[in-house]
Amino acid sequence: MSKTIHLVYISLSGNTKSFVSRLKTYLELKSDYPIETIDVKELVKDGQTFMAMSDYFVAFLPTYLEGGNGLDTGDVEILTTPLREFIAYADNYRYCYGIVGSGNKNFNHQYCLTAKQYAQQFGFPVLDNFELRGLADDVERIGEKVLALYRS
Ligand SMILES: Cc1cc2nc3c(=O)[nH]c(=O)nc-3n(C[C@H](O)[C@H](O)[C@H](O)COP(=O)(O)O)c2cc1C
C-alpha cells in the first residue's frame, strides 16, 4: 500500500490554509501519493480529541507572538498552541518529518520564530518557511522537499 502524505496545520486568518491547499494540489499533480490534510483548529472547534499518528506528517505553523522584538521579549506563542498540543499528543512528534514556518518579515527577529521553538522542543528540523500566503515558488520548493522526504 502506498504511503499517505499527511499535512498537519493551523491557520487563524486563512493564509496557511490557502498555502496547504495549493501545496496539496501541487503534490497531487506531481505524485501518486494520497494526501490528507489535518486542520488542527477545526479539530479543536469540533471538540474532537487529537488522533495518535502512526504515519509520518509535515507540520505547518504560522507565527503569532505577543508583541516584542524576538530577542529579549516577544517570544511567547499565542493562538497557535493547539498545534503544539497536537504534536505533543501521544508522542506524535516522533512521526513529524519537520515543520514549515510562516509569518511576515516585518516582524524581523520574530519572523517564523515559533517554528524554530517547536523544532528545538521536539527535535525535528525546520524544513523551510514562507511569507503570508506563500508564492508559487514556495509551493514548488516546499512540495519538492515534502516529496523527497516521503520518497526516502
Ligand atoms: C497578532 C499577530 C501577531 C503576529 N506575530 C508574528 C510574528 O511574531 N512573527 C511573524 O513572522 N509573523 C507574525 N504575524 C504574521 C502572521 O504569522 C502571518 O500573517 C501569517 O500568514 C498568518 O497565518 P494564518 O493566516 O494561516 O493564520 C502576526 C500576525 C498577527 C495578526
Image (cartoon, rainbow, N blue to C red):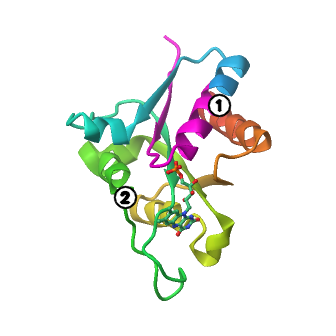
Q: Earlier in the sequence, mark 1 or mark 2?
A: 1
The residue carrying mark 1 is 22
Residue 87 included in the magenta stretch of the image: no
Q: Residue at x 64, y 14 (%)?
A: 32
SS for dot 1: helix
Label number found at residue 44:
none
Q: Which image quadrant for residue 123?
A: bottom left
Question: Which of these two is toward me, 105 or 127?
Answer: 105
Give the position of the C terminus as an image quadrant.
top right
User: What amino acid type is highlighted by mark number 1?
Assistant: Arg
User: What amino acid type is highlighted by mark number 2?
Assistant: Leu
**Ligand 1 contact, mark 2 (Cβ < 8 Å):** yes
Q: Which image quadrant for residue 52?
A: top left
Question: Which of these two is toward me, 76 or 86?
Answer: 76
Residue 7 included in the magenta stretch of the image: yes
Q: Which residues are magenta?
A: 1-24
Q: Viewed as shown, does residue 71 lie left or right of 106?
A: left
The residue carrying mark 2 is 79
